[in-house]
């Protein structure tokens, strides 16, 4: 019976500890057979009515188990337990041997033999118990470690996710910063440009003033010279020179007089240019006047057109006017409204010129006809002015910003970004009107001025 | 009538002499010229009672027309000559200051000589 218990538990222990079913199917099979053998041994033990020869079979079986387990490296992990049954085998063997060799001795000490054998038997289970406990602790530790590893892995993953997230954020920030720097650079360029324009304006005013004085002398002296010529002519009459000579002298005087008049005429021209420069450099010029708005619009349309033509000889555009002749004279700030017209027309011509340039660069110049149109209408005490072009148009984000100061789509040096913001100011604050824009990207732009009259 | 013209531009002299040739010849006007405020004050110290009318530019190096006007009003309160300011800067600030300091008239350049002649004849 004790052989069965020892062998059965040993086999079970090996089977469980080494997970033979999964890890070593070859040995699993053997262990199963060995278990059957131990069952048979139990049966044989009871059938044979605990015959003394039986213990030899038990000894041999256990010895075979120990030998097999000890010889095969596959059982290295359970070797301790396997060895633990050796005392039991040895004691059993010695007892059986004693029983055969010296039966008298055996009979005298059979109690001792039984005690020692029981002790060895119990020892097997104690060691097995310890081993079991140790194994459990190991198992626990292993599980603990596995849990920790899982936790670390999870932490690592979350860290990696965080890093990826941060990297993404940083990349976005970097891009934003780069964009901001670019915007700052272009703003700086625009500021420098507008600063240049402002100082140019001051310079213009200064130059105009400085030219004004000498120009006054030119005009005054030439005027006085005309008067002197007249006097001279009168004086000639009083002298006694032959009429032929008189005629000759009169001819010279007439030429002189005409020359002086020409000097006066051109001097006055220069004077009006200087005056225009002075007025243009001034921030806002004075009072409202009764003005023919149609004539004003027409004048500035031509001015803007020829301004662009002077820079770009190939430029060409159809100028279409649709004036409401019943408007008559309207009370406006002529200088300021002139500036608004100049800005709107300059932009319109620029837009059509750009479109033409783009089309010809991409060889799509079909039959594009640049056209800039002005129309005026007076209706219910309001004056409606429309300046439209079939140029490049504007995307929404550009349209949203065009009335902001310093916003420009033109390359640096070609626009200050102040034209439309100034125009907006003149129409809304200067005239109590509105300035709106309607645009289709790539097709057209229309500015609408509405002024109460 | 004796008129003192104060201007830092030398050519003003010949311009006035030619523009008012007939009047000078006819003895209607008699012009004297000073090319700075200081010179004008020196001239006035010698010929204080003779000068009836002073035409002065405002923007001059050294003493300006405004300072000259102040000095004249301070130095000759008993027989005050008429003072007419002439300037290229026709802004209201210059005008108001001149009138406040006792200028009799204010003209802007370029001078309209026909208008000036009429004004001078009126003074007489």
Image (cartoon, coloured by chain):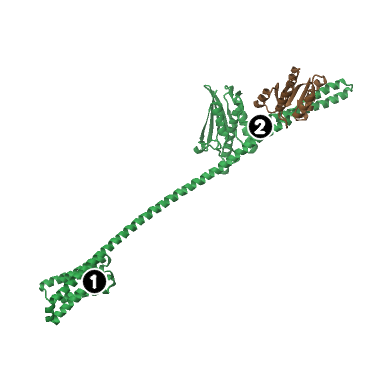
Chain colours: A green, B brown
- Residue A258 pos. (x, y %): 78, 27
What mark, if any, has residue A82 been given in the picture? 1
Q: Spatial distance from mark 1 to mark 2, Cα to Cα?
A: 116 Å
Q: Outermost residue, bottom direction?
A: A101
- The image shows a total of numbered marks equal to 2
For the C terminus of chain A, the image quarter is top right
* Mark 1 touches mark 2? (CB < 8 Å): no
What mark, if any, has residue B121 been given in the picture? none
Along the polypeptide, which appears first: circle 1 or circle 2?
1
Give the SS element for disc 1. Answer: helix
Q: Is residue A184 visible?
A: yes
Q: Nearer the viewer, residue A161 or A102?
A: A102
Chain at tag 1: A
Q: Residue at x 76, y 25 (%)?
A: B5
- With respect to residue A118, does A193 lie above or below? above
Chain at tag 2: A
The answer to which image quadrant residue A142 occupies is: bottom left
- With respect to residue B70, does A307 lie above or below? below
Give the SS element for disc 2. Answer: helix
Q: Is residue A196 left or right of residue A164?
A: right
Q: Is residue A313 visible?
A: no
- Residue B42 pos. (x, y %): 78, 27
What mark, if any, has residue A277 been given in the picture? 2
- With respect to residue A286, does A358 lie above or below? below
The answer to which image quadrant residue A374 occupies is: top right
Mark 2 Cα shell of 10 Å, populated few (<14), some (14-19), many (≥20) = some
For the N terminus of chain A, the image quarter is bottom left
Q: Nearer the viewer, residue A165 or A96?
A: A96
- Residue B51 pos. (x, y %): 78, 22
Q: Is residue B35 left or right of residue A199?
A: right
């Amino acid at each position: 019976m004790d052989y069965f218990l020892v062998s059965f538990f040993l086999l079970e222990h090996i089977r469980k500890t080494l997970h033979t079913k999964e890890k070593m199917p070859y040995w699993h099979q053997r262990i199963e057979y060995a278990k059957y053998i131990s069952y048979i041994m139990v049966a044989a033990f009871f059938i044979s009515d605990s015959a003394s020869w039986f213990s030899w079979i038990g000894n041999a079986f256990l010895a075979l188990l120990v030998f097999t387990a000890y010889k095969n490296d596959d059982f290295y992990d359970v070797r301790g337990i396997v060895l633990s049954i050796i005392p039991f085998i040895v004691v059993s063997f010695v007892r059986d041997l004693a029983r055969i060799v010296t039966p008298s001795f055996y009979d005298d000490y059979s109690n001792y033999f039984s005690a020692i054998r029981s002790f060895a038997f119990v020892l097997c289970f104690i060691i097995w118990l310890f081993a079991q406990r140790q194994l459990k602790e190991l198992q626990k530790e292993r599980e603990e470690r596995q849990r920790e590893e899982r936790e670390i892995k999870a932490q690592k993953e979350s860290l990696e996710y965080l890093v990826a997230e941060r990297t993404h954020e940083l990349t976005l920030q970097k891009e934003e910063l780069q964009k901001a720097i670019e915007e700052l650079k272009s703003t700086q360029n625009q500021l420098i440009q507008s600063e240049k324009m402002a100082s140019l304006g001051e310079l213009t005013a200064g130059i105009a003033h400085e030219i004004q004085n000498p120009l006054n002398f030119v005009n005054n002296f030439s005027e006085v010279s005309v008067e002197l010529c007249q006097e001279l002519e009168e004086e000639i009459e009083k002298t006694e020179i032959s009429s032929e000579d008189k005629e000759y002298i009169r001819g010279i005087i007439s030429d002189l007089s005409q020359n002086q008049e020409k000097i006066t005429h051109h001097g006055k021209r220069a004077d009006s240019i200087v005056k225009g420069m002075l007025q243009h450099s001034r921030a806002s010029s004075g009072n409202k006047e009764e003005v023919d708005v149609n004539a004003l619009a027409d004048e500035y349309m031509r001015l803007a057109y020829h301004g662009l033509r002077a820079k770009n000889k190939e430029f060409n555009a159809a100028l279409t006017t649709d004036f409401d002749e019943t408007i008559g004279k309207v009370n406006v700030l002529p200088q300021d409204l002139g500036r608004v017209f100049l800005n709107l027309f300059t932009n319109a011509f620029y837009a059509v010129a750009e479109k033409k340039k783009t089309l010809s660069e991409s060889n799509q110049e079909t039959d594009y006809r640049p056209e800039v149109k002005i129309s005026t209408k007076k209706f219910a005490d309001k004056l409606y002015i429309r300046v439209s072009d079939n140029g490049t148009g504007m995307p929404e984000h550009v349209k949203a910003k065009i009335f902001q100061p310093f916003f420009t789509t033109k390359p640096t040096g070609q626009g200050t970004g102040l034209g439309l913001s100034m125009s907006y100011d003149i129409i809304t604050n200067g005239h109590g009107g509105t300035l709106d824009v309607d645009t289709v990207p790539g097709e057209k732009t229309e500015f609408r001025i509405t002024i109460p009259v | 009538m004796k008129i003192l013209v104060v201007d830092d531009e030398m050519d003003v002299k010949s311009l006035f002499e030619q523009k008012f040739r007939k009047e000078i010849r006819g003895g209607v006007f008699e012009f004297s010229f000073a090319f700075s405020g200081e010179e004008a004050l020196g001239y006035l110290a010698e010929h204080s009672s003779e000068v009836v009318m002073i035409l002065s530019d405002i923007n001059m190096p050294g003493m300006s027309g405004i300072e000259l006007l102040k000095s004249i009003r301070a130095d000759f309160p008993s027989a005050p000559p008429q003072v007419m300011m002439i300037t290229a800067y026709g802004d209201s600030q210059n005008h108001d200051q001149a009138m406040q300091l006792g200028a009799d008239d204010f003209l802007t350049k370029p001078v309209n000589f026909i208008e000036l002649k009429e004004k001078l004849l009126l003074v007489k």
